[in-house]
Image: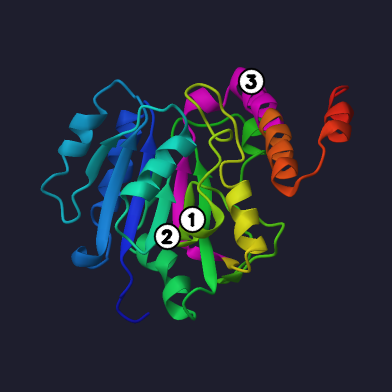
């Protein structure tokens, strides 16, 4: 790959995961990306813990992170705050519990740089779940790499990469809108669908969404996420988020949601 020329902002929304955030930042601050073109934003979504001190502890790193506090609860509120604050032409969103190699940001930026400007609207990196505290076999069976394609290239409209490692061309947000704050995690509510509507809007606007398997992130799954209670809650909240997302799509397209909602009531 040629030397990077695009400016990049890495945005990490975080909520009460101090020690995991520390591990994520340990990889981010040593990214192989020109310092003048690279910044890290940590958006604290009301953690109320030592998150500010953890961010400050990396002040002397090659890429020191910048701390922001977003008091509106919700991961998508934090992401939208990062969009407003970002200086980069590319915004790479990452979760606060991922482990990454030094080439992660380069590989995420590669499709934007190697294609005509404005062709690629978003790039998803490979996300691989790991279990630092072991995992029951019945839970492990639900998790695996995204594996959306084996090589770097465009995805089909129905393929949606995970927000744990997902980059956007910054200017597309001004064109198609910011993240939907009715979706995504809010404190202890594990709503999903954070990225679904944003990706749909990009496809509708004529942008391509790519997948970059070489931009690999290990997604840590602690013991608290391997219990039956958590899996049940996650499944229920994810189902609720799909209903909300469908209704929001209908509203945007000027369609009635009555028939769909009635069909969901028995479920």
Residue where numbered disc 3 is placed = 228
Checking the image for residue 170, the label placed there is 2
Mark 3 crowd level (few <14, some 14–19, many ≥20, 10 Å Cα): few
In the image, residue 267 sits, relative to residue 195, either above or below, namely above
Q: Position of residue 107 (x, y in %)?
A: 41, 67
Q: Position of residue 129 (x, y in %)?
A: 52, 44
Cβ–Cβ under 8 Å for marks 3 and 2: no
Cβ–Cβ under 8 Å for marks 3 and 1: no
Q: Position of residue 88 (x, y in %)?
A: 32, 60
Q: What stretch of residues is rendered in magenta?
A: 210-239
Cβ–Cβ under 8 Å for marks 2 and 1: yes
> Gap in Å between the C-alphas at discs 3 and 2?
39 Å
- Describe residue 246's horizontal placement relative to residue 5 as left or right: right
Q: Residue at point 81% right, 35% down? A: 257
Mark 1 crowd level (few <14, some 14–19, many ≥20, 10 Å Cα): some
Q: Quadrant of the N terminus?
A: bottom left
Mark 2 crowd level (few <14, some 14–19, many ≥20, 10 Å Cα): many
Q: Residue at point 50% right, 48% down? A: 178
Q: Residue at point 36% right, 27% down? A: 71
Toward the viewer: 15 or 170? 170
Residue where numbered disc 1 is placed = 173
Q: Secondary structure at mark 1?
A: helix
> Gap in Å between the C-alphas at discs 2 and 1?
6 Å
- Tell me the colour scheme of the image: rainbow
Q: Residue furthest top?
A: 229
Q: Earlier in the sequence, mark 3 or mark 2?
A: 2
Q: Secondary structure at mark 3?
A: helix
Which label sits in the foreground, 3 or 1? 1
- Describe residue 60's horizontal placement relative to residue 182 as left or right: left
Q: Earlier in the sequence, mark 3 or mark 1?
A: 1
Q: Secondary structure at mark 2?
A: loop
């Amino acid at each position: 790959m040629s030397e990077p020329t695009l400016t990049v902002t890495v945005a990490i929304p975080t909520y009460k995961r101090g020690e995991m955030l520390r591990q994520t930042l340990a990889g981010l601050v040593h990214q192989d990306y020109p310092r003048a073109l690279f910044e890290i934003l940590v958006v604290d979504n009301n953690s109320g813990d030592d998150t500010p001190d953890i961010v400050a502890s990396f002040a002397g790193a090659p890429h020191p992170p910048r701390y922001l506090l977003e008091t509106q609860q919700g991961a998508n509120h934090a992401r939208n705050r990062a969009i407003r604050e970002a200086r980069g032409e590319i915004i790479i969103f990452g979760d606060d519990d991922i482990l990454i190699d030094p080439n992660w940001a380069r590989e995420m930026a590669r499709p934007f740089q190697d294609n005509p400007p404005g062709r690629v609207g978003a790039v998803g990196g490979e996300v691989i779940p790991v279990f630092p505290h072991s995992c029951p076999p019945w839970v492990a069976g639900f998790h695996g790499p995204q594996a959306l394609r084996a090589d770097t290239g465009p995805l089909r409209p129905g393929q949606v990469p995970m927000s744990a490692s997902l980059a956007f061309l910054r200017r597309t947000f001004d064109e198609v809108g910011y993240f939907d704050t009715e979706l995504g995690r809010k404190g202890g509510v594990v709503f999903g669908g954070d990225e679904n509507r944003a990706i749909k809007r990009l496809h509708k606007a004529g942008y391509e969404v790519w997948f970059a398997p070489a931009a690999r992130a290990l997604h840590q799954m602690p013991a608290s996420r391997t219990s039956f209670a958590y899996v049940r809650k996650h499944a229920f909240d994810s189902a609720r988020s799909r209903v909300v997302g469908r209704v929001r799509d209908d509203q945007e397209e000027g369609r009635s949601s009555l028939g769909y909602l009635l069909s969901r009531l028995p479920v």
